[in-house]
Amino acid sequence: ILHWQANAGTTINSQILIEVANCAESINGVKEGRWKNTFTFYKPILKEQANASEFPQNFLGVSLQEQPDKFYMAISRQRLVVEAESSMQTIMENLQSYRMKLAVNCEGLQYRLGDFRLRVGKVVPINSENLRGIVMEMEYLPISSWETSHLIMSEFFEIWKETLGKRLLPGHFVHVEPIFSEFGLSDQYTSQHTVVQYASILAQMAATSQSLQATRN
């Protein structure tokens, strides 16, 4: 999973997203429809401050389109990813243990290019069109081993970069690879690996946004 890094002095806009989608089609990507993942940042509702150490201060709740019956919780500080039934969100609401700070959708179009699946989408707060970022998922479908597919994915990404580079856009896609073993994840790729990557990307987007805000202030 990659995210768009704008050049210094430029901002992310919807035209970049359109150009990226057009690029996928220009290399014979077949449009397969739309996709959407939802990410919710939670913080604990503490009845007594003395209990603060017993709860994770913040965590990221994740709902993935391909796993509609599941709900994932990424607690980055403890390097932990938990998989639960989707009803967990209702349970948390009923217990009033955590409250939502912010919820965003990653949504866009899905393409098939031979053995690769490519998803291109925008990061926007729920009930808003305020563009926070652009993400791209690349998946090599025949192999589930992260290490084995890594080289093939890298070669595909080089072709993609070369094609996208011709459009002279003000930025580029970057991939910051988390150390999956820190989260207890094996080489066989799962939805939990996807959650860890998104948690890293969204944290980076939040840090960049805060940095820009501080610069403006």
Image (spheres, helix red, strand yellow):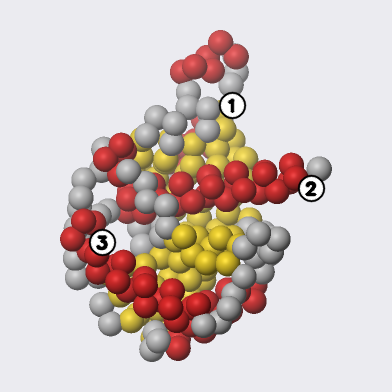
Q: Nearer the viewer, residue 163 or 136?
A: 163
Residue at the limit of the structure toward the top, as seen here: 50
**Horizontally, is 8 left or right of 123 in the view?**
right
**Residue 64 found in image quarter:** bottom left
Q: Position of residue 146 (x, y in %)?
A: 23, 56
**Who comes first in sequence, dot 3 or dot 1?**
1
Q: CA distance from mark 3 to mark 1?
A: 41 Å
**Which labelled disc corresponds to residue 216?**
2
**Horizontally, is 217 left or right of 209 in the view?**
right
Mark 3 lies on a secondary structure that is helix
Residue type, mark 1 in image: Ile
Q: Position of residue 165 (x, y in %)?
A: 50, 77
**Which labelled disc corresponds to residue 45?**
1
Q: Nearer the viewer, residue 70 or 106?
A: 106
Residue shown at the point (30%, 44%) measured from the top left: 180
Q: Which residue is mark 3?
A: 150
Residue type, mark 2 in image: Arg
- The answer to whether any part of residue 69 appears in the image is no
Pointer 3: residues within 10 angstroms few (<14), some, or many (20+)? few
**Horizontally, is 26 left or right of 15 in the view?**
left
**Who comes first in sequence, dot 2 or dot 3?**
3
Residue shown at the point (40%, 30%) measured from the top left: 78
Tell me: residue 131, above or below residue 98.
Answer: below
Q: Position of residue 123 (x, y in %)?
A: 57, 60
